[in-house]
Each structure stands twice: as structure tokens, then as C-alpha cells.
């Protein structure tokens, strides 16, 4: 295992079976009346992680976060933080601080008083509180606003106060509910990196709830994709994007072309799948039983447009007619209609001002992709 | 529209204010009247203010009314705030609709019925429990608090339901125990509503005649009762003088309260 030199924290603790998780969630469920919000969630979160709970609204991610903070009592299952069972421990006795989606700044207190609130509950000496407040405000770069009231701040400034307040007690675990949700796009992108830098500097464990997959991909060490109260997949952004384990994850993260087919033959190290859309598809890996239904997922940028004369041997190939072109500046997305009528997407980086082989509407285009880039999905 | 006929809107405003305030202004003016007759102006004088200071019956009634109103307002704010919490924070508990209805019922209950039913209750209670012994200040305060509480509940409830719950959760999350969250977050944030409720309850109690008449006993005559009975025997300008004193006091209180709120905001 690689040990991070600067941080003293393990680099990828989730790959080490002997590593002790900082937060352990076992079989956690929560229902409100007849409605199940969270069902059977098992998760291990390690010290120093930037862990993202990602899902559409209503998928249970916020309920899960609120159970960690102690605002909701689990219907069943256990939460351990640093080895301690959290059952029955009220929010004000948990070693956890939360940053609320609405920021929840106390309107009758100044910025400094807001940040100092948690420290005062620990009965720290006044001088130390003042020092710590100054440090925190400097950390989030709003040192000059200490005497303002929340209603005299912009949205971005309030977000920083809320962050400073949740970090002031130096908790080992910080929970952030849509921390950047209320910011406009430009500010959100800047703040993403800042948040990661702060998290790395403080060596704190962050658990972030977000519905924005780009945000999760940019910031998180690992992402937990949730759907209908259940965990779909947990992995690094790279794993989640390149090797989704279900149609839901493939569809939810980025764009995906999905080819339905049936396992035709299983060889060593590769499997042939017959599909109505593009004929035979070869994917890497084996083990599936012949005749089993399977879906092959290929990302749009993994499919290359091919000069008509030279298909690469061993690649999966197909042909289609360009129906839509979306020019996005840095890249263009082409929607191709296959002979079967299915539409697929294909992305191409615009490397030169003028493309060498421009593609137009209604052009007949041949394409191919490497077998390693097709991901078989069984669910 | 508004720009074309400014005189029309302005004259409506003046008429409205005249309708509302000319009786009060005439009351104040006639308190400085020399004459014994309230309707005839015979010269400026402060003699009725002097006479008021000698009128122990009237001053005693005013002092009783002030004490009743103070106690009523305080009691109503305590009970009304608690019931507002129950209505806003306890979710849809069993019997919530009934509870809400019964809390609000005194708002629409005729004073005569409130007064009579409380009188019967107090008489019955005295017979069975021996308390309250006779009618007097205690029974008036209890009776006033029954309807003033409803007003406080309404005022505090609307403020409380607008309060972002995550503010209290944030305070809990930062390590404040629940009692402290109420003391340093919730109460300071609903304080304006509680103050407004207190002032409302004070006013309601202070000018109530009907309920007080039913629930008071010998030796406990509130100011409205005193004024009402003296009017029947012919009104004295002393009452004008007393009213003027109260108008000045109330105006000063409102101005002061405004000043305090604005200073805190700045």
C-alpha cells in the first residue's frame, strides 16, 4: 500500500482489507411511515476521504446524511463512527459537524458569532475562540466580513461562512448537504477545487451529498451512486465512469450507448455477444453463460469514426447515418442512426480549427471501438 | 391612475385619518377644558389633571387594570407560546385538529358567553375546591388569559412556522444541548412575535369590560368598569385626562419599542 508522504494518510485505504474504516454503516434502513427512504445500505468510509453520495432527488442520500448527523433515527441497522456505535447518541454529542443546504446561518448573529458558536459550546477560553474564528475565516478567505450579519452577505459569502462554521470545531467528520448547490456555475467550479484543497489541508473526512455528477467526479475520492434508497455502486470516479455495474449507473453518470444482446460464445479472456444493432460485439473478460441476456455499454468518446477503407482487425465495427450534430466547442457530439433504427452517440474532440474530415448531416459513417472499451452489464 | 389625480387619493387619506383620529384628538383637547361640561369649551386649564390625582377610586381602578393586564399578558405569552410550539412542532399528533380548534375558539367566542361560563365555573370551583375564594383580580386574570392566549398562539404560531428548522438543527449539530438551542436560537428568533403577542394581550385585557364585569367581585373594579359606570352618572373630564395620560404612555412605549428594534438591526 502506498502511504501518502505529505498527509500521513493512507492513499487508497478501501483497497486494503485490513484498513479500519472511520465510518461503518451496516444494513442501514429508514422508512417514514410506509415509505422506505433508505434500504439496506452498507458502506465503509475511511479517514481523510472525500466521499460523495450521488443520486437524483428523493434517492435517500440526504436521509442517509441526516442519520449520520443524528437528526434521523435509523429504522434498522447500525452506524459506527470511529468504532463507536451511534445508536441513541443525540446530534449534539456526535463528533460530527454538518453544513446545511440552506446554510442555516443564525440570522441574529454576526459572521464571527456564527463561527464561534460551536467553539463556545466547548467552553473554550474567549481568546482561543477568537483566534480559531480568525483562522477559519482566513481559511475560507472572508476575514474582512467578521462583523457582518448573514443578510448583508452574498450567496457565495454565506456558503463560506457555513463552511467555516462546520469546520471550526475541527471535527473528524464533516457532512455537507449540497454544499455548492446554491451557487452559480462559474463560482461553483472555482469552489469545487477550493473545497478539495481545504479538505486535504485539514485531513478531515468529508461526506458530501450532491445530485451533480460533475461535482462528484471533480471532488470525490470515491462516489456512492444511490437509487431508490439503495446503493447502486461504490467506487472511484474512474471506476464509476469506466466500469459501471448497472444500466442505472451507466446512464446516470455521463452519456452511454447501450447495446442489448445475448451471449453467443465465451472464450478465454473475451466474450462474443450477438446484438441486433451492430452484429457481433466482442468484449474483454469471460465467464458468462451462453444464451444469457447482456447489455454492452460504450461511452460516446470511446467510439471512433473510421475511414471507410481501413477497419482495425479485432475492433467492433458498425455503420450509421448522422442525424444530429451538437457542436460544443471543445468537442462535437454526433447522433447516428443505425440500420436497426437505434440511435447512438459518438463524441469527437475538435482538435483543429478545421477538422481534417468534416462530418455533415446525413453522412454515412463507419465507426469502431476497441473490445476493452465495451462494458458488459448484466443488470 | 395614481399619478393623474393625486388630490383624490390624498383627500381619501385625510378623510380616513380624520375618521380614525378626530375623536381621540377631541378627547385630548377637552381634557384641557376649563368647563365641567365635556362638550362646551370655556378655556384652557389643567385642573382635571389635578383632580385626577385626588381621585383615588379612578386611580385605583387604573392601577388594578394595569396589574391585571401585565399578568394577563405574561401568562398568555407563556401558555400561547407553548401551544404554538405544540401546533407547529409536534407534527400531526392525535387530536391535533381538536386541539387547534379549541385553542382558537376563544377568538370567535362572544365575550358574554366567555364571561358567563367562567363565572359559573369559578362559583362551582369555589364550592367544590374552595379556590378561588371569591372573585377578584385572580379570576379576572384567569378569564382574560383564556381569550388572550388564543391571540398570542396565532401570532407566535405564524412566526414559528416560518422559522427554518435547520437553524435549530445547526445549533444542535454544533454541540448545543436542546434547552440551550431554545434559549439562544429559537427564542431570540421568535422574540418579536412574542413581544407583539404580549402587547396584544395587554391591550385586550386592559380595555375589556364584559368579561371583567362577569368575573370580578366586590372591591375589584377595573378601569373600563369604573369608566362605564361613571359615564352613566354623567361623564367627568377627569376621564379625558386619564385617557390622555394613557395615550401618551402607549405612544411612548411604541416609539421606544420601534427604536429598540431598529437599533438591534443596524
Image: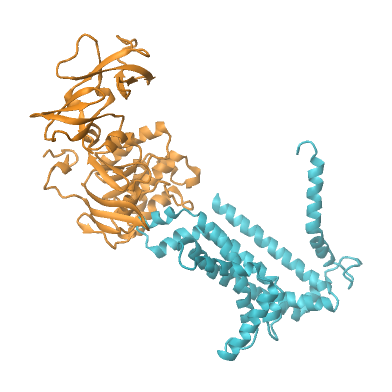
Residue drawn at x 37%, y 46% as measured from the top left:
A58
Question: In which quadrant of the rendered image does the N terminus of chain B lie?
Answer: top right
| Quarter assignment of residue B37 | bottom right
Please state the horizontal and vertical placement of residue A64, each as a whole percent of the image. Answer: 31, 51
Please state the horizontal and vertical placement of residue B24, each as a whole percent of the image. Answer: 79, 62
Q: How many marks?
A: 0
Q: In the image as oriented, which residue stretches furthest toward the left?
A: A268
State the colouring used for the structure image: by chain
Q: Is residue B22 among what the camera can see?
A: yes
A103 or A273: which is nearer to us?
A273
Q: What colour do you see for chain A?
A: orange
Seen in the picture, residue A286 relative to A210 is either above or below; the reply is above
Q: Is residue B64 among what the camera can see?
A: no
Seen in the picture, residue B159 relative to A215 is either above or below; the reply is below
A162 or A367: which is nearer to us?
A367
Please state the horizontal and vertical placement of residue B250, each as a whole percent of the image. Answer: 69, 64
Q: Relative to residue B146, is residue A29 drawn left or right?
A: left
Q: Relative to residue A207, is residue B139 drawn left or right?
A: right
A259 or B233: which is nearer to us?
A259
Q: Relative to residue A233, is residue B111 drawn left or right?
A: right
Please state the horizontal and vertical placement of residue A94, each as a whole percent of the image. Answer: 29, 57
Q: Which chain is assigned cyan?
A: B
| Quarter assignment of residue B203 | bottom right
Q: Relative to residue B152, is residue B38 drawn left or right?
A: right
Residue drawn at x 59%, y 52% as measured from the top left:
B262
Amino acid at each position: 500500500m502506498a502511504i501518502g508522504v505529505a498527509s500521513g494518510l493512507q492513499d487508497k485505504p478501501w483497497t486494503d482489507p485490513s484498513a479500519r474504516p472511520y465510518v461503518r454503516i451496516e444494513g442501514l434502513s429508514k422508512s417514514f411511515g410506509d415509505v422506505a427512504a433508505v434500504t439496506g445500505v452498507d458502506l465503509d468510509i475511511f479517514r481523510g476521504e472525500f466521499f460523495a453520495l450521488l443520486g437524483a432527488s428523493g434517492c435517500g442520500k440526504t436521509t442517509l446524511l441526516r442519520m449520520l448527523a443524528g437528526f434521523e433515527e435509523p429504522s434498522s441497522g447500525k452506524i459506527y463512527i470511529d468504532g463507536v456505535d451511534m445508536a441513541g447518541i443525540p446530534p449534539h454529542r456526535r463528533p460530527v459537524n454538518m453544513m446545511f443546504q440552506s446554510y442555516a446561518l443564525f440570522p441574529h448573529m454576526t459572521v464571527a458569532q456564527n463561527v464561534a458558536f460551536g467553539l463556545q459550546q466547548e467552553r473554550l477560553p474567549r481568546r482561543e475562540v477568537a483566534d480559531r474564528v480568525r483562522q477559519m475565516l482566513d481559511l475560507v478567505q472572508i476575514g474582512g466580513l467578521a462583523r457582518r450579519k448573514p443578510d448583508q452577505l452574498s450567496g457565495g459569502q454565506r456558503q463560506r461562512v457555513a463552511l467555516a462554521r462546520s469546520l471550526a470545531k475541527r471535527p473528524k467528520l464533516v457532512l455537507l448537504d449540497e454544499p455548492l448547490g446554491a451557487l452559480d456555475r462559474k463560482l461553483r467550479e472555482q469552489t469545487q477545487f477550493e473545497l478539495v484543497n481545504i479538505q486535504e489541508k485539514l485531513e478531515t473526512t468529508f461526506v458530501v451529498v450532491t445530485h451533480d455528477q460533475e461535482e462528484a467526479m471533480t471532488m470525490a475520492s470515491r462516489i456512492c451512486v444511490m437509487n431508490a434508497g439503495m446503493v447502486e455502486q461504490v467506487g472511484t470516479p474512474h471506476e464509476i465512469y469506466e466500469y459501471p455495474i448497472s444500466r442505472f449507473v451507466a446512464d446516470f453518470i455521463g452519456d452511454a450507448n447501450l447495446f442489448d444482446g445475448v451471449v453467443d460464445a465465451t472464450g478465454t479472456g473475451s466474450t462474443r455477444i450477438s446484438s441486433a444493432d451492430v452484429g457481433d460485439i466482442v468484449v474483454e473478460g469471460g465467464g458468462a453463460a451462453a444464451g444469457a441476456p447482456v447489455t454492452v455499454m460504450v461511452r460516446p468518446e470511446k467510439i471512433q469514426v473510421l475511414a471507410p477503407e481501413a477497419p482495425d482487425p479485432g475492433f467492433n465495427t458498425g455503420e450509421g447515418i448522422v442525424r444530429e450534430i451538437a457542436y460544443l466547442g471543445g468537442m462535437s457530439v454526433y447522433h447516428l442512426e443505425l440500420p436497426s433504427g437505434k440511435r447512438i452517440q459518438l463524441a469527437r474532440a475538435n482538435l483543429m480549427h478545421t477538422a481534417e474530415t468534416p462530418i455533415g448531416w446525413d453522412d454515412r459513417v463507419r465507426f469502431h471501438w476497441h473490445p476493452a472499451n465495451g462494458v458488459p452489464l448484466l443488470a | 391612475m395614481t399619478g393623474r389625480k393625486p388630490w383624490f387619493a390624498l383627500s381619501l387619506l385625510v378623510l380616513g385619518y380624520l375618521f380614525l383620529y378626530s375623536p381621540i384628538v377631541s378627547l385630548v383637547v377637552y381634557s384641557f377644558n376649563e368647563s365641567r361640561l365635556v362638550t362646551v369649551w370655556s378655556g384652557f386649564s389643567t385642573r382635571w389633571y389635578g383632580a385626577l390625582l385626588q381621585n383615588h377610586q379612578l386611580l385605583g381602578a387604573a392601577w388594578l387594570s394595569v396589574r391585571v393586564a401585565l399578568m394577563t399578558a405574561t401568562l398568555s405569552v407563556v401558555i400561547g407560546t407553548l401551544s404554538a410550539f405544540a401546533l407547529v412542532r409536534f407534527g400531526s399528533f392525535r387530536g391535533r385538529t381538536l386541539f387547534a380548534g379549541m385553542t382558537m375558539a376563544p377568538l370567535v367566542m362572544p365575550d358574554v358567553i366567555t364571561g358567563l361560563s367562567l363565572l359559573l365555573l369559578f362559583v362551582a370551583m369555589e364550592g367544590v375546591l374552595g379556590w378561588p375564594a371569591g372573585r377578584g383580580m385572580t379570576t379576572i386574570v384567569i378569564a382574560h388569559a383564556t381569550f388572550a392566549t388564543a391571540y398570542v398562539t396565532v401570532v407566535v404560531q405564524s412566526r414559528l412556522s416560518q422559522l427554518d428548522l435547520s437553524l435549530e438543527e445547526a445549533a444542535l449539530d454544533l454541540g448545543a444541548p436542546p434547552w440551550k438551542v431554545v434559549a439562544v436560537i429559537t427564542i431570540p428568533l421568535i422574540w418579536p412575535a412574542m413581544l407583539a403577542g404580549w402587547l396584544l394581550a395587554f391591550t385586550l385585557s386592559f380595555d375589556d369590560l364584559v368579561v371583567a364585569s362577569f368575573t370580578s367581585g366586590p372591591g375589584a373594579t377595573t378601569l373600563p368598569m369604573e369608566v362605564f359606570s361613571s359615564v352613566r352618572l354623567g361623564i367627568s373630564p377627569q376621564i379625558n385626562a386619564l385617557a390622555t395620560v394613557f395615550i401618551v404612555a402607549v405612544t411612548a412605549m411604541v416609539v421606544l419599542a420601534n427604536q429598540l428594534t431598529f437599533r438591534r438591526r443596524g
